[in-house]
Image (cartoon, rainbow, N blue to C red):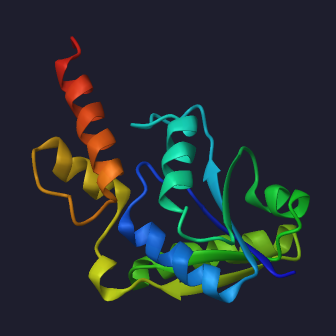
Amino acid sequence: MHRAVCPGSFDPVTNGHLDIVGRASKIFDEVVVAVGVNQSKNRLFDAEERISMLREACEEFPNVRVDGFTGLLTDFCRSNDIQAIVKGLRAVSDFDYELQMAQMNASLAPIETVFVPTSPEYSFLASSLVKEVATYGGDVSALVPGFVLERLTARLAERAAAPA
């Protein structure tokens, strides 16, 4: 069985993420969407919330499962019998960083990295941008699944109402 991982923080999951996951699901027998759990990073959504949103978002892909991981991605891959890492590339600047990461990962474990170019309609899309635009009331409804938009809007409202 050819198994791949699509790793990320997914804070929150976007339509761009789902495009890459869906395309990977057509190439590999199984795709694991691996949510990086790093307690030291300040996220809008905690790990369980991100995993829950991804599970809902990936329901349409029968060969995709969602899991969380801490530590090195290569260790997660080894323990889950994963042979490939799938990374979406939006721009040349992504490639510079991701190539270094792929080479580092290959030095740590026998795992290949597969680069998938982002679909043109998502080439600008990043979770950080979605959060920033939504924070200032911009319309991000075409950039995330509807249920993610609801949770994002609610979380931003909670944060705005919280005392400083």
Say which residue appears at 62% left-offset and 49% top-offset. 36
Judge by depth and name the residue closer to the eye, 24 or 69.
24
For residue 85, say whether it is visible.
Answer: yes
**Residue 42 spot, x, y in % from top left:** 45, 34
Say which residue appears at 9% left-offset and 45% top-offset. 137
Say which residue appears at 31% left-offset and 87% top-offset. 120
For residue 9, say whether it is visible.
Answer: no
**Residue 148 spot, x, y in % from top left:** 35, 49
Q: In the rendered image of this protein, does residue 5 appear above or below residue 89?
A: above
Q: Residue furthest top?
A: 163
Where, by quadrant of the figure, is residue 65 drawn?
bottom right
Image position of 88 (left or right of 100): left
Q: Quadrant of the N terminus?
A: bottom right
**Residue 121 spot, x, y in % from top left:** 28, 82
Where, by quadrant of the figure, is residue 103 drawn?
bottom right
Say which residue appears at 42% left-offset and 83% top-offset. 118
**Residue 58 spot, x, y in % from top left:** 54, 63
Judge by depth and name the residue closer to the eye, 99 or 31.
31
Q: Quadrant of the C terminus?
A: top left
Q: Residue furthest left?
A: 137
Image position of 15 (left or right of 51): left
Q: In the rendered image of this protein, does residue 19 appear above or below residue 150?
A: below
Q: In the rendered image of this protein, does residue 121 appear above or below residue 66?
A: below
State how many labels appear.
0
